[in-house]
Amino acid sequence: MLKQSHYKVGCDAHKHYSLFAVLDHRGKPVEQTRVNHEPGAIRAFVSRFPPGTPVALETVGNGPRPATYGLVLDRG
């Protein structure tokens, strides 16, 4: 788990992968990651952050399956 607890995560979800951007407590980008939609991949990525970490999910286009959102929402 990352030491800092004040992250904000953005997710641009596509059909076969999601792009995540992580901002620190000052709003400064600290990471950009592509996560392929493979079993356990999104869960592994979001589990690095404390439950309750804000995540913004895009909701339009040829996006992800509902399970993608569920994995993020399960983290609180």
Image (tube, rainbow, N blue to C red):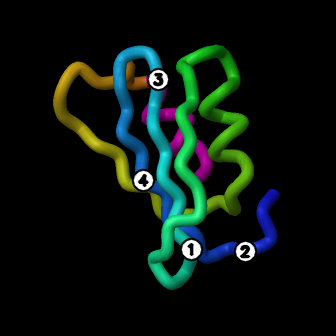
For the stretch drawn in magenta, the main secondary structure is helix
Tell me the CA gap for discs 4 and 3.
Answer: 14 Å
Q: Specify the amino acid type for callout 3.
A: Tyr
- Which residue is most to the left? 61
Which mark, by number, is residue 24?
1
Asked if the residue under mark 2 is in contact with the one under mark 1, i.e. CB atoms within 8 Å, the reply is yes
Q: Is residue 70 magenta?
A: yes
For image coordinates 61% across by 49% down, the residue present is: 75
Q: Are marks 4 and 2 in contact (CB under 8 Å)?
A: no
| Residue 12 part of the magenta segment | no
> Residue 10, labelled with which disc?
4
Q: How many marks?
A: 4
Tell whether label 1 touches label 3 (CB within 8 Å): no
What x and y, as percent, mark residue 24? 56, 74
Q: Earlier in the sequence, mark 1 or mark 2?
A: 2
- Measured as percent of width and height from the top left, residue 18 is found at 45, 31
- What residue would you read off at disc 2? 4
Q: Which mark is residue 17?
A: 3
- Label 1's element? loop
**Which image quarter: residue 44?**
top right
Precedes in sequence: disc 4 or disc 2 = 2
Left or right: residue 3 compared with residue 42: right
Image quadrant holding the C terminus, namely bottom right
Magenta residues?
Answer: 67-76
Residue positioned 66% across, 34% down in the render: 43
Kindly give the residue lying farthest to the bottom in the view shown. Answer: 26
Calculate the distance from the C-alpha at mark 3 to the C-alpha at mark 1.
23 Å
- Category of crowding for the residue at label 1, using alpha-carbon neighbours closer than 10 angstroms: few (below 14), some (14–19), many (at least 20): some
